[in-house]
């Protein structure tokens, strides 16, 4: 198992919120407000966790230039992490 995958598994395992968000994006693209509604995580917390997942290459923003309605999806690494948690 490569180090990047191990580090990503550790990152997600340390936070119930990161795990919920990653599972929520497993099969679909979503906006932060939809993620908040489906996971029960307060909207004010969502951006913090999306940022950490994005920095770890577990998710990607499909329209980063948008001020509103940003859309996120899981990456191949994120999908691989879900197989191990």
Image (tube, grey):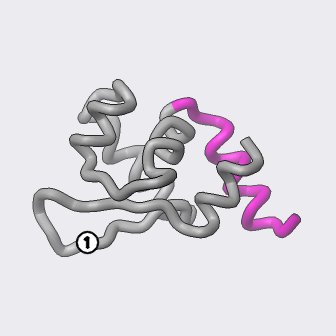
Please give the name of the residue rendered at 47% of the width and 54% of the height, measured from the top-left corner. 27
Decide which of 40, 3 is in the foreground and name it: 40
Read off the magenta span: 1-16
Please give the name of the residue rendered at 72% of the width and 46% of the height, measured from the top-left corner. 10
Q: Quadrant of the C terminus?
A: top right
Q: How busy is the neighbourhood of tag 1: few (under 14 within 10 Å), some, or many (20 plus)?
A: few
Q: Is residue 13 magenta?
A: yes
For residue 27, side relative to residue 66 (left or right): right
The answer to whether residue 52 of the structure is visible from this angle is: no
Q: Quadrant of the N terminus?
A: bottom right
Please give the name of the residue rendered at 25% of the width and 51% of the height, measured from the top-left corner. 31
Please give the name of the residue rendered at 25% of the width and 34% of the height, measured from the top-left corner. 43
The answer to whether residue 32 of the structure is visible from this angle is: yes
Give the farthest residue toward the right: 1
Give the farthest residue toward the front: 27
Q: Is residue 5 above or below residue 48?
A: below
Residue 54 image point, x, y percent: 46, 62
Give the farthest residue toward the left: 68
Residue 19 image point, x, y percent: 56, 39
For residue 22, side relative to residue 28 (left or right): right
Give the dominant element type of the magenta stretch: helix, strand or loop.
helix
Decide which of 8, 31 is in the foreground and name it: 31
For residue 30, side relative to residue 59 (left or right): left
Please name the residue that numbered disc 1 is placed on. 64
For residue 49, side relative to residue 6 (left or right): left
Decide which of 28, 43 is in the foreground and name it: 28
Q: How many marks?
A: 1
Residue 84 image point, x, y percent: 76, 47
Give SS at disc 1: loop
Q: Is residue 35 magenta?
A: no
Residue 33 image point, x, y percent: 22, 41
């Amino acid at each position: 198992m490569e180090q990047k995958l191990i580090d990503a598994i550790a990152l997600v395992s340390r936070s119930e919120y990161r795990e919920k968000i990653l599972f929520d994006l497993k099969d679909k693209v979503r906006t932060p407000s939809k993620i908040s509604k489906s996971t029960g995580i307060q909207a004010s917390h969502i951006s913090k966790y999306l940022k950490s997942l994005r920095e770890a290459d577990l998710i990607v923003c499909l329209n980063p230039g948008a001020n509103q309605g940003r859309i996120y999806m899981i990456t191949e690494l994120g999908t691989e992490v879900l197989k191990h948690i």
